[in-house]
Image (cartoon, helix red, strand yellow):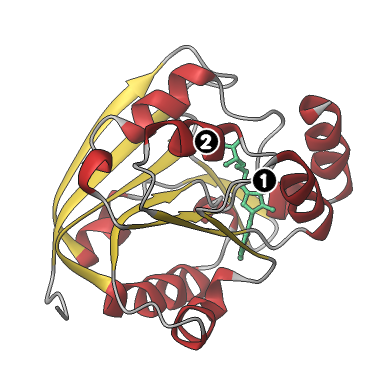
């Protein structure tokens, strides 16, 4: 069912969905492995799709934690609402570019971990910078962010396909950026682990 919902949305809007299939369990666990989830209080997931990583996060998080999920696609958001009935979950149907207002309005000031599956390669440089500028005020010294990118690293720019590495963008905001390839995913993906935020606010 998740796979069918995902494929339909990928066909309808590939630029935003930015994938042909949900993440594999191998990619989900690689995205979670670097995070200190057992002691996390507030975790942010950016771009949940049909919830492949959301489920792993809920399995790993303690009962007192909160998982805030942003998903721009209304069909995915409805699917997530139907699939997960967990009191720790806050599902927000909004663009991450508005995350600062959405988080503040709900009283959140800082997040302990960020898991992002956003197709940053399909966004313009301005959109990427806006997302990080909105995120960074909520990040503290120990916040860790994971982000994946398919290993082909393709980007659409001015109607043309190019290769894009996310590392320079991530390095603007985090002093430590490490990467690891997960082959058991369609397509294989590179997981970036970002630590030591530049100028954390807390
Ligand atoms: C590559 S899919 C990943 C889905 C899921 N996390 C997984 O790994 O299977 C990216 C997701 O990000 C969502 N998304 C893209 N741009 C977004 C934005 N600006 N704000 C919120 N969600 C966004 C898409 O709708 C899509 O569900």
Locate the N terminus by quadrant: top right
Q: Is residue 17 above or below residue 66?
A: above
- Circle 1 residue: 85
- The CB of the residue at mark 1 lies under 8 Å from ligand 1: no
Q: Locate residue 162 relative to residue 200 in the image: left or right.
A: right
Q: Residue furthest top?
A: 184
Locate residue 53, reporting x and y percent.
Answer: 52, 35
Left or right of residue 19, residue 123 in this image? left
Q: Position of residue 168 (x, y in %)?
A: 26, 56
Q: Which mark is residue 159?
A: none
Mark 2 or 1: in front is 1
Identity of the residue drawn at 76% across and 47% down: 14
Label 1 sits on a secondary structure element that is: loop
- Sequence-wise, which precedes: disc 2 or disc 1? 2
Q: Secondary structure at mark 2?
A: helix
- Whether the residue under disc 2 has CB within 8 Å of ligand 1: yes
Residue at 45% x, 78% y is: 130
Q: Residues within 10 Å of mark 1 (few under 14, many from 20)?
A: few
Q: Please give the residue where the numbered disc 2 appears in the rendered image.
A: 53
- The residue nearer to you, when weighing 29 against 170, is 29
Horizontally, is 181 left or right of 13 in the view?
A: left
Between 157 and 48, the one nearer to me in the picture: 48
Q: CA distance from mark 2 to mark 1?
A: 15 Å
The vertical placement of 70 against 5, above or below, is below
Residues packed near mark 2 inside 10 Å, few (<14), some (14 to 19) or many (20 plus): many
Q: Residue at x 25, y 34 (%)?
A: 179
Whole-percent x and y of residue 75? 84, 52
């Amino acid at each position: 069912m998740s796979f069918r919902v995902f494929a339909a949305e990928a066909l309808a809007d590939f630029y935003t969905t930015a994938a042909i299939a949900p993440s594999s369990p191998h990619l989900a666990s690689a995205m979670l492995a670097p995070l200190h989830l057992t002691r996390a209080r507030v975790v942010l997931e950016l771009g949940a799709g049909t919830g492949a990583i959301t489920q792993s996060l809920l399995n790993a998080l303690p009962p007192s934690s909160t998982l805030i999920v942003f998903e721009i696609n209304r069909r995915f958001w409805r699917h997530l609402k139907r699939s997960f009935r967990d009191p720790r979950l806050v599902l927000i149907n909004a663009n991450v570019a508005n995350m600062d207002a959405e988080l503040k309005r709900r009283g959140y000031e800082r997040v302990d971990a960020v898991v992002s599956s956003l197709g940053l390669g399909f966004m313009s440089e301005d959109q990427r910078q806006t997302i990080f500028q909105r995120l960074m005020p909520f990040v503290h010294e120990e916040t860790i962010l994971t982000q994946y990118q398919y290993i082909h690293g393709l980007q659409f720019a001015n109607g043309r396909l190019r290769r894009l590495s996310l590392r320079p963008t991530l390095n603007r905001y985090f002093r430590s950026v490490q990467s690891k390839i997960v082959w058991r995913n369609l397509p294989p993906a590179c997981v970036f682990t970002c630590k030591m935020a530049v100028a954390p606010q807390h």
